[in-house]
Amino acid sequence: MAAPAEPTPKRASSLTLRIISAAVLIPIVAVAAYMGALPWRVLVCVFGVVMMQEWCIIASGLPDPSGLGKRVPALEKARPTVPTMFVLVGLISFRTDVPWVYWWEALAFALVCTFIITAWKDRRAAPWFVIGLLYVMLPCTAILALRADPTVGLQQILWIVALVIAADTGAYIAGRSIGGPKLAPRISPNKTWAGLGGAVVSAAIVGAITAVLMGRPGILPLTAVSAVLAIVEQAGDLAESAFKRHFGVKDASNIIPGHGGALDRVDGLIAVAAAVAGINALIGSSVLTWL
């Protein structure tokens, strides 16, 4: 008699861990977002530092040229201390009442220093550590700036978090129940076009509910923007997957049970936050009040 198959219990166990982790993380994020100020800054700093550490650890190995899937510790001498410290100092010192030009100058200085110091240890580390510093600093700063909005700061964060959770959940349910053609099989074999559709529909629903709760004159504009941001969220997920696949890594770390690392958990969130901050900068106000 054949032994019973194991995949189902493993999937169930993984799903259970994901639910437990979400049950712990969501209240923490909600409370910190509601309190704002120092609690929110501390939370963003913690995630920023962990993300930078994970990125540098992944980037400290290159794919085996033979294509056998082995990892070569080619950058083991290039420690993540420098970019991580720039992330920490940058997020702690960020202020919305300081002209943005000074922030960009500080970021440029951090990028140049990271490149020089890393290249001194190993030239192959420099480009990846610089990219990682940008990947972490830009969205984390955007998240701080979004919450600092004196009128709709809390609403922006709650809308973005709810949108990302809905998109992830919708993609998972639609992808598992419908299946069909793969969205990007070389980058993320489990993602399907049906999953993308589920993400778009779920995020659109969040947008419609948000518009109603905020008393907006029309529901359609925010619904449409939320649907588009679901595509951004899925693109952020794919971008992080492509980075890990390049280095032959499945998970950024095991810090969050069932999810992997901080990079794995917030890849879509940071993409959406950066996009919303960019839209706000272009229109000169919050997208929540503009639409």
Image: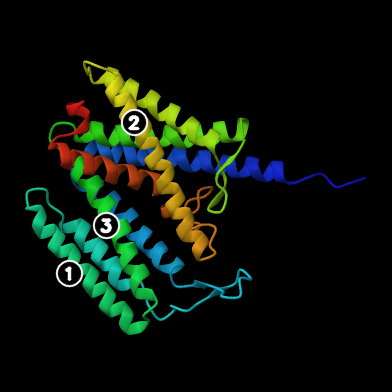
In the rendered structure, find residue 137 and report the number of the disc placed on it: 3
Which quadrant would the N terminus be assigned to in this image? top right
Crowding near the residue tagged with mark 3, few <14, some 14–19, many ≥20 C-alpha atoms within 10 Å: many
Residue 162 sits in which quadrant?
A: top left
- In the picture of the structure, the residue carrying the numbered disc 2 is 226
Sequence-wise first label, 2 or 1: 1
- In the picture of the structure, the residue carrying the numbered disc 1 is 109
Which quadrant would the C terminus be assigned to in this image? top left
Crowding near the residue tagged with mark 2, few <14, some 14–19, many ≥20 C-alpha atoms within 10 Å: many
Q: Is residue 195 above or below residue 262?
A: above
Identity of the residue drawn at 60% across and 72% down: 70
Q: Nearer the viewer, residue 85 or 106?
A: 106
Can residue 261 be seen?
no
Crowding near the residue tagged with mark 1, few <14, some 14–19, many ≥20 C-alpha atoms within 10 Å: few
Sequence-wise first label, 2 or 3: 3
**Residue type (three-letter) at the residue carrying disc 3:** Met
Can residue 62 be seen?
yes
Sequence-wise first label, 1 or 3: 1
Q: Is residue 88 above or below residue 233?
A: below
Task: Report the residue that reaches farthest toward the right.
Answer: 1
Identity of the residue drawn at 48% across and 43% down: 21
Q: Give how far across and how far down residue 73 sits, in percent.
A: 50, 77
| In the image: residue 197, left or right of residue 126 | right
Question: Pointer 2 and pointer 3: residues touching (CB < 8 Å)?
Answer: no
